[in-house]
């Protein structure tokens, strides 16, 4: 059974969505992110995906008040990404009540640290974000590219002890087009890791197809906020309820 996980992206303490990861192209959906969190849980969400967009650029989480408010407001697990680049930061997030931390930039720049985090915190608390543009991994809040392919990073992370990755096609994120199904399927089949798919999900049938190709979970953002996807309906269609 594939999880459908609503995304709550934080920028300046507000719940926003970006277009293709562009900080200059934001849409504000709520100034009270914790109320958004409660709304998704009431509609059936069993987990929430929170991204600190400011933190991704700053190199450390900065929307701490909003993150704490979300964790306090809901009883489902919360996973957090954005600026988690040290052991202390990861520990602090987990101490705050976060269940899983999402590592992005350090997976490319400090793979040994990822291995250390898996060993110290436990692999169940670690997700590595594989964020790709044209097949190559993007880092530092998607503002910089790299020469590493998505599949190569996934395989390197598996060697480091990671069991779960989140794959995002940056060019599709926030566009309401469709996911990069080929990219997701390649990672599912060739990395043998649990793959959380994100980026471009615009309709319930996209979720059904992701479930069919073996995604462990789908992260849905803009399509929920625009009403393109109804969460309860989507959960039913993928067999989650």
Image (cartoon, rainbow, N blue to C red):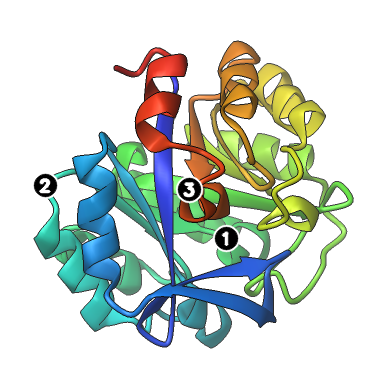
Q: Position of residue 71 (x, y in %)?
A: 17, 61
Residue 198, by quadrant, is top right
Q: Above or below — where is 202 with respect to 120?
A: above
- The residue drawn where x is 59% and y is 16% is 214
Q: Please tell me which residue lies in front, 218 or 145.
A: 218
Write down the residue under mark 3. 224
Write down the residue under mark 2. 75
Of label 1 and label 2, which has the lower sequence position?
A: 2
Of label 3 and label 2, which has the lower sequence position?
A: 2
* Crowd class of label 2 (few under 14; some 14 to 19; many from 20; radius 10 Å): few
Is label 3 in contact with label 2 (beta carbons under 8 Å)? Answer: no
Q: Secondary structure at mark 3?
A: helix
Q: Position of residue 91 (x, y in %)?
A: 25, 64
Q: Secondary structure at mark 2?
A: loop
Residue 157, by quadrant, is top right
Q: Position of residue 138 (x, y in %)?
A: 74, 63
Of label 1 and label 3, which has the lower sequence position?
A: 1
In the picture, measured across the screen, residue 238 lies left or right of residue 236, that is: right
Q: Position of residue 78 (x, y in %)?
A: 27, 51
Q: Please tell me which residue lies in front, 105 or 56.
A: 56
Spatial CA span between label 1 and label 2 = 26 Å
Is label 1 in contact with label 3 (beta carbons under 8 Å)? Answer: no
Q: Above or below — where is 117 with respect to 26?
A: above
Write down the residue under mark 1. 104
In the picture, measured across the screen, residue 116 lies left or right of residue 41, that is: right
- The residue drawn where x is 29% and y is 38% is 45
Spatial CA span between label 3 and label 2 = 20 Å
* Crowd class of label 1 (few under 14; some 14 to 19; many from 20; radius 10 Å): many
Q: Please tell me which residue lies in front, 135 or 49.
A: 49
- The residue drawn where x is 54% and y is 56% is 112
In the picture, measured across the screen, residue 177 lies left or right of residue 174, that is: right
**Which tag is nearer the camera, tag 1 or tag 3?**
3
């Amino acid at each position: 059974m594939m999880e459908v996980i609503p995304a709550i992206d934080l920028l300046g303490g507000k719940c926003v969505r970006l277009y293709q990861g562009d900080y200059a192209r934001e849409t504000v959906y709520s100034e009270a992110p914790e109320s958004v969190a409660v709304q998704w849980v009431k509609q059936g969400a069993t987990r929430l995906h929170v991204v600190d967009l400011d933190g991704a650029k700053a190199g450390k989480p900065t929307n701490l008040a909003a993150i704490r408010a979300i964790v306090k407001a809901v009883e489902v697990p919360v996973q957090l990404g954005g600026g988690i680049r040290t052991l202390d930061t990861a520990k602090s997030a987990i101490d705050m009540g976060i269940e899983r931390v999402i590592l992005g930039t350090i997976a490319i720049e400090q793979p040994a640290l990822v291995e250390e985090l898996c060993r110290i915190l436990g692999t169940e608390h670690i997700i590595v974000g594989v964020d790709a543009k044209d097949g190559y991994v993007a880092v530092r809040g998607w503002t910089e590219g790299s020469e590493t392919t998505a599949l190569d990073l996934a395989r390197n992370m598996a060697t480091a002890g990671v069991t779960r990755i989140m794959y995002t096609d940056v060019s599709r994120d926030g566009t309401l087009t469709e996911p990069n199904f080929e990219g997701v399927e390649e990672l599912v089949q060739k990395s043998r890791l649990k793959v959380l798919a994100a980026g471009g999900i615009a309709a319930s049938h996209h979720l059904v197809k992701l479930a069919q190709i073996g995604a462990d979970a789908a992260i849905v953002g803009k399509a929920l906020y625009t009403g393109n996807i109804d969460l309860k309906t989507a959960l039913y269609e993928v067999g989650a309820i």
